[in-house]
Amino acid sequence: MYRKLVLDNGVRVVTERIPTLKSVTVGIWVNTGSRDEQPSQAGYSHFIEHMFFKGTRSRSAADISREIDALGGEMNAFTTRETTTFYVKVLDQQLKQAFDLLADLFHHSRFDSREIEKEKQVVLEEIRMVQDDPEDLVQELHTGQILGRHPLGRSILGREETIRNLRRQDLMAYIDAHYDPTQIVIAVAGNFDQAVLGKMVARHFEKATRAAGVARAARRPPEVHGGLITRKKPLEQVHLCLGLRGVAAGHRDRYAVYALNSVLGGSMSSRLFQEVREKRGLVYSIYSFLSGYSDVGTLTVYAATRPKEVDRVVDLVCREIGRIGRKGVEQKELARAKNQMKGSLMLSLESSHSRMSKLAKDELVYGTRTSLEDMLAQIDRVTTEEVYAVGRQLFALDRLAITGLGPLSSRALHAYR
């Protein structure tokens, strides 16, 4: 059963009680992420997420870890370009202790200056880890290329310079400006007592107020850029990203775009997987994926191959993109894609954590819940004509962005320069 409550201070609470489960997941979602940072604040959202686990007024960092382990649960957080999320998943009988712990972290973290200095080194190591992972690195470079200097194009982790120079007062000022109750969504899914949960939410969040701070700048949509960027790096393979404009998270054509992505490279039966890997053996890994933000979206193809096969792989990818753009998809391809989409959707919602995430995302994007039945019906309604129209609009090779990372020769990708 779905319910929505808006507290007097603007905090939104969305819940789905699923009595057949033995678990419950609570998530606190803040509608702020790396896109809301100024250049001098690059990495603040992610760093703040780390600091919430470094001790509160009543618990040390070690106490926090021991307490969640004693509950037999899972507690974590993550930062995206548009949101920051803190969550805990436990057995239903442990909800009160878990909620108290999560609320304590959210409201009473100390942000001790000594802990901040230690955590700087942790985040710097995280940045270096991305630099050593070519799949992550090429996708980060590609995001920066296709979205340019827009805040969405920056790394979520930030830059080494901004991380080294940040101070406690900088972080607290950022929280004051961005962690407004009206930007907070509490999402709960699983087995719980609605009345008991309501009391817990009221006790911990009803009095939450915004500290006086500088209001954050309004979000503005980015331009999507094409072109070619390469970076040489001594690797065994060349890692490639090819990107096009997609659609925003709540766009009316999103289901047709999901189908396009599935046919192109979103599954093992996709054109790219079958043509480039299975038929020709040119890659081990090749896939496409969608990134949907509140005001823009992208579609990206990733592949890794031997240096001498770079041009051939890019040509094959471009051929399939161009073919879909000109001719659309076949009826049997669309039917297979729709079945795959429905199966993946239903399987993804079998846990309280995934249900919690869907609740929060629905609230942030649409302001209400979209039912599973409605989503399945939307998928069923997608037609080949609709996919063809969207493909013609999005799959234009003259707007293609290509990013290459690895031991590229001077002649590689010459046709795209």
Image (cartoon, grey):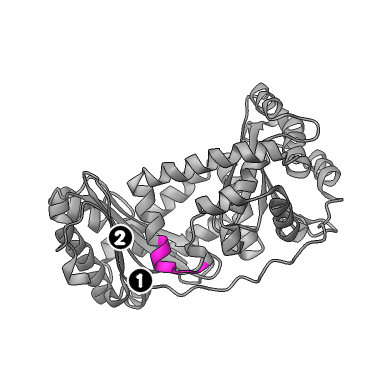
Quarter occupied by residue 55: top right
Query: What is the crowding at mark 1: few (fewer than 14 residues within 10 Å), some, or many (at least 20)?
Result: many
Q: Are marks 2 and 1 in contact (CB under 8 Å)?
A: yes
Amino acid residing under circle 2: Val
Question: Is residue 261 visible in the rendered structure shown here?
Answer: yes
* x and y percentages locating residue 180 in the rendered image: 75, 58
The residue at the point 22 percent across, 45 percent down is 284
Tag of residue 263: 2
| Front residue (pair 15, 149) | 149
Q: CA distance from mark 2 to mark 1?
A: 11 Å
Question: Is residue 256 visible in the rendered structure shown here?
Answer: no
* x and y percentages locating residue 288 in the rendered image: 33, 57
Q: Which residues are magenta?
A: 143-150
* x and y percentages locating residue 196 in the rendered image: 81, 38
Quarter occupied by residue 190: top right
Find disc 1 in the rendering and name its residue. 387
The residue at the point 27 percent across, 68 percent down is 329
- Residue 8 on the magenta segment: no
> For numbered disc 1, what is the local secondary structure?
helix
